[in-house]
Amino acid sequence: MKQHTQLKLAVIPGDGTGPEVTAEALKVLHAVASLERFTCALTEFDFGGERYLRTGEVLPEGAVEQLRACDAILLGAVGHPDVPPGVLEKGLLLALRFQLDQYINLRPVKLYSGVETPLRDKGPQDIDFVVVRENTEDLYCGVGGFLKKGTPDEVATQSAVYTRKGCERCIRWAFEFTRKRNNPKGKRLTLVAKTNVLTYGHDLWDRTFREVAREYPDVQADYNHVDACCMWMVKNPEYYDVIVTTNMFGDIITDLGAILQGGMGVAAGGNINPDPGGCSMYEPMGGSAPKYTGQNVINPIAAISAVAMLLEHTGYPVAGARVLRAIEHVTGTKMKSQSAGKMGYSTTQVGDLVVEALAAC
């Protein structure tokens, strides 16, 4: 990917502890930009729960076009206890994924040095794989409705939508990513689906996967039912290189992956439109964690990891790798825990430690 002379970044700090972790992520971004000699132009947007409660708007008119003009988006978190469930998730997160066509959800499942995992006898060498989740179809399309709602005869339907185009572009991107990742243990792409029960949509996924696989003879094409995948992610996570899966199943197994890598405080992800001129969004996975708001105790590592991903996929791979090395230095030699309030440092101090480590990494 061609490097921009200036990184034009939209920033959505969001709700709860989102602004706190975003501040540390930007602190690291500015530091690595100085070291690697590129510049950043930031535009902040106040989208989230507070704006919705104040104005009744989630995404104001023209907002998507403003975001589309940026190279990437850094999101802190959205979620507010006074906003009904679904309002922000559908009106902001899903709206941006769909309208910006961010059809790849990329979730590295990597155990950093010094971070505890609940898996006995597993270490960083064992937990290092990536989940590629289709991000714009499946049950998230909102196709369905109610009949006789609120009565004893109520019927609710929710239909999953899969298209050949949607399957193929995600699968092909995953094969390319697996080839580029070039795992020294062997390049393997595992399709995770449920073809024995979901015999229409997942048959389409399976057929598309097998057809595209013929174009990538250097990549081992593999298959797991989703229930078996959940078992093997716990028992033998070292088996996996790259997983490609549907939107719903990806939503579930990436949360399992987050726990394997030490929790939501370290897990980051990207909602990616890899097409030329596409705008992608990167974020920590931990949510807004409102009970910790303003206490300076929340873990910013996931948000800083999101910056590393953003740099890697927006034309600054050297800077992104440098941030990852600095993170691993801090988790491996400084932090006592990845849990909020137990890190041995405040939120701002962890950010300072990563900035300090950048100079030596």
Image (tube, helix red, strand yellow):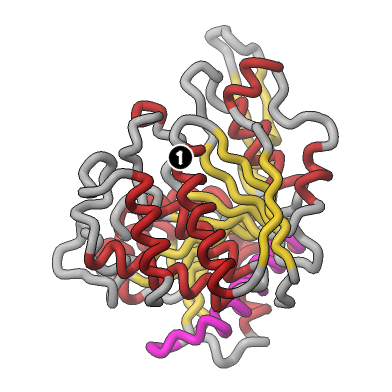
Q: Residue 241: which quarter of the image? A: bottom left
Question: Which residue does the image show at 59% across and 72% down from the upper left?
Answer: 174
Q: Nearer the viewer, residue 113 or 182?
A: 113
Q: Is residue 43 left or right of residue 353?
A: right
Q: Is residue 152 left or right of residue 62?
A: left
Kind of residue indicated by mark 1? Glu
Residue range of the region highlighted in magenta in the rendering: 165-186
Question: Which residue does the image show at 33% across and 31% down from the upper left?
Answer: 295
Q: Which residue is mark 1?
A: 20
Count every numbered label the image shows and give the total. Answer: 1
Residue 315 x, y percent position in the rendering: 66, 72
Quarter of the image that includes the C terminus: bottom left
Secondary structure mostly taken by the magenta-highlighted segment of the chain: helix
Residue count near mark 1 (Cα–Cα under 10 Å), binned few <14, some 14–19, many ≥20:
many
Q: Nearer the viewer, residue 170 or 278?
A: 278
Query: Would you say residue 208 is visible in this rendering?
Result: no
Height in image: 275 above or below 210?
Answer: above
Quarter of the image that includes the N terminus: bottom right
Residue 49 x, y percent position in the rendering: 58, 25
Question: Which residue does the image show at 58% across and 15% down from the upper left?
Answer: 154
Q: Nearer the viewer, residue 197 or 77?
A: 77
Height in image: 74 above or below 172?
Answer: above
Query: Would you say residue 39 is visible in this rendering?
Result: yes
Q: Residue 153: which quarter of the image? A: top right
